[in-house]
């Protein structure tokens, strides 16, 4: 299947008409198009029209890769890092085509320490990001290798997926019964106090920024005439975020951009993965169009 490479990224295409665009910057998937039920190509992800894609700041949309910390850093090894870590604002390199057959096409991108990373993060690591496009499915696998022979590394990882959806009509299931942390709470104690999700389906009719712990690894974001399934491996937690009117304060968020997406973000963000020397950890997200 055709793979178009430019200096800034790669586009994969599938005979069904679907396509995915990946920037080398942050290994950020910035477009995933799948024909809808009327065979029109439809964009399934949201990228703000005010997003920077020139590498000057992380892309506001698509699927930013969050590593080695989620949110503001809390681990001593991450003390010099900015929010969500460095993976989403570094230039990754194209390694190779991993698979190319009638089922789909798959490419691998790599990120290794460079002087800028080494100035803020002392641990050795090797990241590989494998993006696979099938007819109605997009898989993104983050491989974290610990090349050290002596030291473990501790990290968090998350795929910050901006699903294109009517935010005022979208529902996320199944989260009922899960323990979650509400980052919109006014004070730190409330933010650190877990609550139990009582809703059978979660909407984002108000500013929502919830970190669900130990989820079922399979979710659906659905709306009238549309929906995506999100499956995860190893990403034991999931974040649901939509800023509503607060989104107007986000410099690179288009006016009312909040109305056009929901973030459902599989991650390992409560606690840290402890990766022993020489070992590899793989977190996977599989997005499948289920309607629309
Ligand atoms: O994943 C949700 C979240 O942590 C929110 O708290 C909000 O900060 C969002 O990520 C966007 O973060 P960013 O650093 O990309 O502006």
Image (cartoon, grey):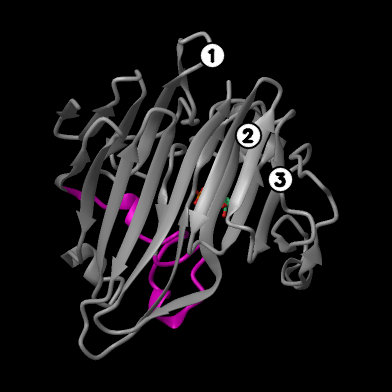
The percent position of residue 207, horizontal first and vertical second, equals 73, 44
- For the point 79% across and 61% down, which residue is it? 177
**SS class, disc 1:** loop
Secondary structure of residue under mark 3: strand
Look at the image and tell me whether residue 226 can be seen: yes
Check whether the beta carbons of the residues at disc 2 and disc 3 lie within 8 A of each other.
no
* Residue receiving disc 1: 37
Q: Give the x, y percent position of residue 159.
A: 46, 51
Residue 19 higher or lower than 270, as above or below: above
Q: Where does residue 216 sit, x and y in percent of width and height?
A: 63, 58
Does the magenta stretch mainly form a helix, a strand or a loop?
A: loop
Crowd class of label 1 (few under 14; some 14 to 19; many from 20; radius 10 Å): few
Q: Pointer 2: residues within 10 angstroms few (<14), some, or many (20+)? A: some
Q: Which residues are magenta?
A: 68-94
On the image, numbered disc 3 is attached to which residue? 173
Left or right of 235, for residue 32: left
Question: In 3D space, how far apart are the residues under numbered discs 1 and 2 (Cα atoms)?
Answer: 33 Å
Residue at the far bottom: name it: 150
Residue on which disc 2 sits:
248
């Amino acid at each position: 299947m055709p793979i178009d490479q430019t200096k800034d990224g790669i586009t994969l295409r599938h005979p069904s008409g679907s396509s995915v665009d990946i920037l080398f910057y942050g290994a950020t998937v910035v477009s995933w198009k799948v024909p809808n039920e009327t065979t029109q190509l439809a964009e399934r992800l949201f990228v703000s029209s005010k997003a920077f894609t020139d590498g000057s700041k992380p892309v506001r949309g698509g699927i930013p890769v969050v590593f080695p910390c989620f949110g503001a850093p809390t681990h001593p090894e991450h003390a010099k890092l900015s929010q969500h870590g460095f993976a989403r604002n570094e230039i990754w390199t194209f390694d190779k085509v991993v698979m190319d057959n009638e089922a789909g096409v798959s490419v691998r991108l790599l990120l290794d320490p460079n002087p800028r990373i080494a100035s803020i993060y002392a641990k050795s690591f090797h990241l590989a990001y494998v993006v696979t496009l099938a007819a109605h499915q997009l898989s993104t696998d983050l491989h974290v290798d610990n090349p050290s022979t002596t030291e473990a590394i501790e990290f968090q990882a998350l795929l910050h997926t901006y699903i294109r959806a009517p935010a005022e009509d979208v529902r996320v299931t199944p989260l009922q019964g899960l323990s979650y942390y509400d980052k919109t709470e006014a004070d730190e104690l409330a933010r650190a106090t877990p609550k139990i999700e009582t809703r059978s389906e979660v909407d984002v009719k108000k500013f929502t920024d919830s970190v669900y712990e130990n989820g079922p690894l399979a979710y659906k974001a659905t709306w009238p005439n549309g929906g995506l399934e999100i499956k995860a491996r190893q990403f034991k937690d999931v974040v649901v975020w939509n800023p509503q009117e607060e989104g107007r304060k986000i410099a690179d968020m288009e006016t009312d951009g909040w109305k056009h997406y929901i973030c459902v973000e599989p991650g390992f963000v409560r606690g840290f993965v402890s990766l022993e020397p020489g070992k590899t950890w793989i977190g996977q997200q599989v997005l499948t169009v289920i309607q629309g």
